[in-house]
Image (cartoon, rainbow, N blue to C red):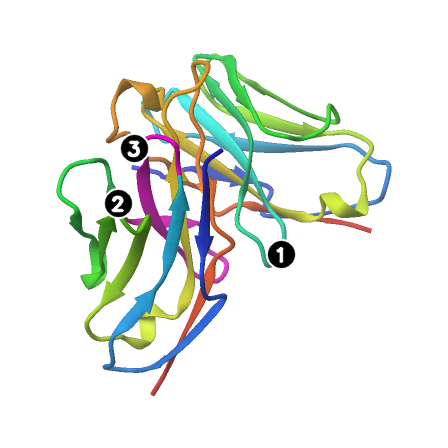
Amino acid sequence: DAGVTQSPTHLIKTRGQHVTLRCSPISGHKSVSWYQQVLGQGPQFIFQYYEKEERGRGNFPDRFSARQFPNYSSELNVNALLLGDSALYLCASSSGRMDRGPNTEAFFGQGTRLTVV
Amino acid sequence: AQSVTQLDSHVSVSEGTPVLLRCNYSSSYSPSLFWYVQHPNKGLQLLLKYTSAATLVKGINGFEAEFKKSETSFHLTKPSAHMSDAAEYFCVVRPPLVGGYNKLIFGAGTRLAVHP
């Protein structure tokens, strides 16, 4: 079975532009979460979606938005890009909401490396 | 608030010697704790998890971690390092359910170097 797939793998954008990152979860997984990993730091939680609804949001500005589609894939959108948005963006999928049990594991994709110039 | 502190940003060991990566957590409730590994240009892989069962947790590739509530620690160990263990390691806490969702809180990471 395919793991979590993210596209594109690398991306270069100019300040002020908009970017869309995509994620396909593991087949059968209904929950997708997005994380931002700035160089030299641990990943920071951005969003969690479950059954196409936003279930949680981290401390990120409104320039960041996301959605989940009926097939459970997800998009992360970032508007008005800043240099500080340069990071590795990670998508994680899990079988369900983590409140359904402590053993729900999050599986991560390889990430999209975004560089803003 | 929940948080994790990884006490060493870099650890260097010789192949065949023990590995110790230190992690302290802060949590008002009994947390779920994890260790993830990130190899260059690869995604995060779960090494092991603690979810209030046995305090000594065994993971993949010979790693294990011990949950010590009195010390609020969850240190990662391996008896004998292998060259392939060189990577970035993250200690992670998952706080109890809040508002219908859950999230992972990552430490800053420890870069493990293994020398021949």
Tally of numbered discs: 3
In the displayed structure, A50 sits above or below B56; it is: above
Residue B108 in percent (x, y) is at 52, 54
In percent of the image, x 15 and y 37: which residue is there? B53
Drawn side of residue A94 relative to residue B106, left or right: left
Chain under callout 1:
A
Residue A54, position as x, y percentages in the image: 53, 15
Q: CA distance from mark 2 to mark 3?
A: 9 Å
- Residue B31, horizontal then vertical, whole percent: 32, 35
Instruction: Tell me the magenta residue range.
Output: B27-48
Question: Which kind of residue does numbered mark 3 sit on?
Answer: Ser
Residue at disc 1, secondary structure: loop
In the rendered view, does A16 fall on the left or right side of A9?
Answer: right
Q: Residue at x 28, y 29 (%)?
A: A104
- For residue B112, the mark is none
Q: Is residue B36 above or below residue A105?
A: below
Residue bearing the label numbered 1: A39
- Do badges 2 and 1 share one subunit? no
* Residue designated by label 2: B69
Q: CA distance from mark 3 to mark 1?
A: 30 Å
Earlier residue among tags 2 and 3: 3
- Label 3 CA crowd tier, 10 Å (few <14, some 14–19, many 20+): few
Give the residue type at disc 2: Lys
The image quadrant of residue B21 is bottom left
**Circle 3 is placed at which residue position?**
B30
